[in-house]
Amino acid sequence: MLQKIWFRVVWCYIKIGLFFYSKKITVNGHENIPKKGAVLFAVNHPNGLIDPLFVTTTNCRQNHFLVRAASFKNKFIKKILESLYLMPIYRIRDGIKQLANNQEIFNKCHHILNKGETLMIFPEGSHNRKRTVRPLSKGFTRIIFGALEKNNNLDIQVIPVGITYQHPSSFPTKVSINYGKPIATRNIYVNNSPAKAINILKNNVSNQLKQLSVHIPDDENYQSVLNKLTSAQVDFTEVSLVNEMIKNNQFPAEKTAKRNNIKSLKFIILINSLLPYLLWKKIATKIDEIEFIDTFRFSILLFTCSIFYGLQAYVIYLFWGLEIGIFYFTVSAFLIFIYVKLAPTNAKFLD
């Protein structure tokens, strides 16, 4: 019970943070999420650990997550992640011997699904900003069919989830989260051989992901298509429209990027957030994977700005009273809100 309360508190904190971090969060297909019963969310993975944050804060289910084992190396971070229902999944790159640990994780996943709870998995196996749905690993099918084998009364709904960012790793972010149609797995498992059942489920999930997120086929024309879409300044979060352009090979004319006319507001925010900004700039130089920029920037700014603004508000309260302290904190948050919502989607603030 305490863990569930802790999860819900952190969930609310992160949801508020993402609201201030994002220019716009578009959610479609929310009605496809069952209110009860075993569900596995199969999500594409363009942008590091911020991907599961967007998904879990835009649906009503309390999720368990499978993330790469490298995130659990630090003992302190490991305890925090485990308290928030995150579990490590080991890959070949983590070492052949480590793969044996996956069986224990799979057993935990079977138990979670058997209780009618939810699990979130990224079946592409790794993150990549490329605007294409990559081949899916069969690990998620092993978890599903393993749980079905242990419980003849269990059915698991797989819901593909497509995430598309306007400009991954840029702030403020603009993102679309699209929930697909549930895929009932019991019939697939019962009526087909194991190998055929795996392929059917993988193909069903992959086909939906290619409709739920912007998908440019990864062939010799990929870069040319991407350049045309980028030059036309298309809104990538309008997923269906962009996919239709790709399918028909018809693209809008090239457009000039909008100018950022709120530089004075940006300057005020930087001065008011100087220490969080300097801390972020120092840490940013140590990030060696571009897909983790959003993850670290969001985490650092959410934590440090909350504390920094709170401390400054407390100092103001000591000198000028409670009302002035609250006023300062409110105005600080409001300035960020105004900038994030008004900034052009090609802004490069805090990059």
Image (tube, grey):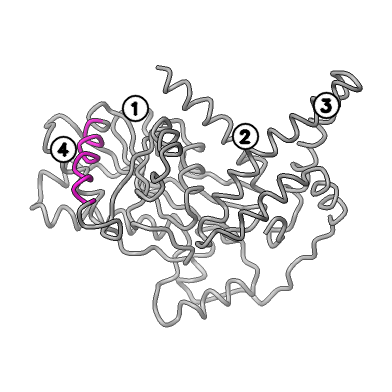
| Marks 4 and 2, the one that precedes in the sequence | 2
Q: Amino acid at mark 2?
A: Ile
- The label on residue 315 is 3
- Amino acid, disc 4: Leu
- Which marked residue is nearer to the observer: mark 4 or mark 1? 4
Q: Tell me how far mark 2 sits from mark 1, CA to CA.
A: 25 Å
Q: Is residue 109 magenta?
A: yes
Which callout, 3 or 1, points at the residue further toward the start of the chain? 1
CA separation in Å, label 2 and label 3? 24 Å
Residue 14 in percent (x, y) is at 57, 36
Callout 4 environment at 10 Å: few (<14), some (14 to 19), or many (20+)?
many
Give percent across and percent down for residue 144: 21, 42
At 53% from the left and 44% from the top, the residue drawn is 27
Q: Which amino acid does the dot numbered 3 rest on?
A: Val
Q: Quadrant of the C terminus?
A: bottom right
Query: Relative to residue 117, is residue 215 depicted above or below?
Result: below
Which residue position holds label 2? 16
Cα distance, mark 3 to mark 4?
Answer: 58 Å
Image depth: mark 2 or mark 1 in front: 2
Q: On the picture, is 305 further left or further right than 321?
A: left
Q: Residue extending furthest right?
A: 320
* Residue that numbered label 4 is attached to: 148
**Which callout, 4 or 1, points at the residue further toward the start of the chain?**
1
To which residue does mark 1 refer?
A: 36
Q: Secondary structure at mark 4?
A: helix
Q: Quadrant of residue 66?
A: top left
Mark 4 to mark 1: distance in Å?
A: 17 Å
Q: Which residues are magenta?
A: 98-111
Between label 2 and label 3, give the one nearer the viewer: 3
State if disc 1 and disc 4 touch (CB < 8 Å).
Answer: no
- Residue 97: where, in percent of width, then height? 20, 53
Task: Bin the neighbour count of mark 3 within 10 Å (Cα to Cα): few under 14, some 14-19, many 20 and up.
Answer: some
